[in-house]
Image: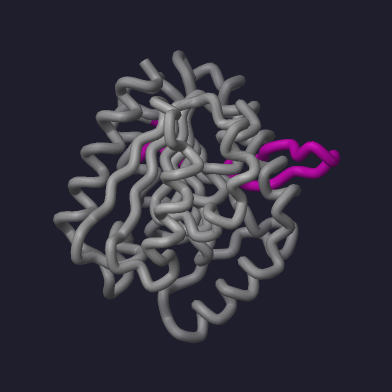
């Protein structure tokens, strides 16, 4: 892979890192991959590389840099405790501002020859949703975004196409929460929802025991189709 770490200027005069992965042909639409709570770790970098192989110019920003730069955790019990601490201490408004800065940096790259979107997982799913409300991207994908149901006040601000993936047996996001998000987007023909039966939260992550190959492949196929249409 043609991958590297680059610096992005923040809105408040600092810089933070992002993992950049370029497509084989060097140019393409832009895509922001937004991490889970374990940082821009091996799994997130592999997801970024996967989308780069599909022809996207991919940036995966370090969302915890204001606490600790380059957090890279594994799925062990001890690392997961640290991960939850980072998530709990995340400054939400600054995180969204950092994502807007990422979107601006991505659009400015010479390799980007089209629109840009975002794909976020868990915490990143919630942030992908929040980023969509700013208008900084042209499309958004949210994998099991925890907490979206508690931030539905910004739903009317989302005017770009948005795709939601939810797990039927999610022990973090109950069915009532999913229903409330659906209700908030009722009548919005730019929003699409998919529920994956028989699987739990985190089904897309091959590093975790809840990984489900079939659901992950199906969701990825739907995401690629969505992005190919919305970022054309």
| Most foreground residue, 74 or 126 | 126
Quadrant, the C terminus: top left
Residue 215 visible to an observer of this rendering: yes
Residue drawn where x is 56% and y is 72% of the image: 83
Left or right for 107, reference 77:
right
* Residues shaded magenta: 1-22
Name the residue at 34% across, 54% down: 166
The image shows residue 177 at horizontal and vertical percentages of 46, 59
In the figure, is residue 210 to the left or right of 130?
Answer: left
Say which quadrant the N terminus sits in.
Answer: top left
Is 124 situated above or below 113? Answer: below
- Within the magenta stretch, is there residue 14? yes
Residue 102 percent across, percent down from the top left: 62, 35
Picture coordinates of residue 108, whole percent (x, y): 61, 20
Q: As drawn, is 165 to the left or to the right of 105?
A: left
Tell me the residue at 42%/22% (across/down): 29
Furthest residue in direction bottom, as rendered: 78
The secondary structure that most of the magenta stretch takes on is: strand
Q: Is residue 24 magenta?
A: no
Q: Quadrant of residue 158?
A: top right
């Amino acid at each position: 892979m043609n991958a590297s770490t680059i610096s992005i200027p923040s809105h408040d005069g600092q810089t933070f890192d992002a993992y950049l992965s370029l497509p084989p042909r060097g140019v393409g639409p832009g895509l922001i991959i937004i991490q889970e709570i374990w940082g821009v770790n091996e799994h997130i970098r592999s997801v970024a590389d996967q989308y780069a192989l599909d022809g996207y110019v991919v940036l995966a920003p370090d969302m915890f840099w204001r606490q600790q730069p380059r957090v890279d955790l594994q799925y062990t019990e001890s690392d997961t405790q640290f991960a939850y601490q980072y998530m709990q201490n995340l400054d939400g408004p600054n995180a969204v501002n950092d994502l807007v800065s990422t979107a601006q940096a991505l659009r400015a790259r010479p390799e980007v020859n089209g629109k840009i979107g975002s794909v976020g997982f868990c915490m990143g799913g919630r942030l992908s949703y929040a980023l969509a409300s700013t208008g900084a991207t042209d499309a958004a994908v949210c994998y099991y975004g925890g907490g979206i149901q508690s931030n539905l006040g910004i739903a009317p601000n989302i005017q770009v196409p948005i795709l939601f993936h939810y797990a039927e047996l999610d022990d973090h996001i109950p069915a009532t929460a999913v229903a409330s998000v659906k209700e908030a987007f009722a009548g919005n023909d730019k929003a699409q929802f998919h529920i994956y039966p028989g699987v739990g939260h985190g089904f897309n992550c091959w590093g975790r025991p809840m990984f489900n190959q079939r659901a992950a492949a199906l969701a990825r196929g739907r995401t690629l189709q969505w992005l190919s249409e919305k970022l054309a």
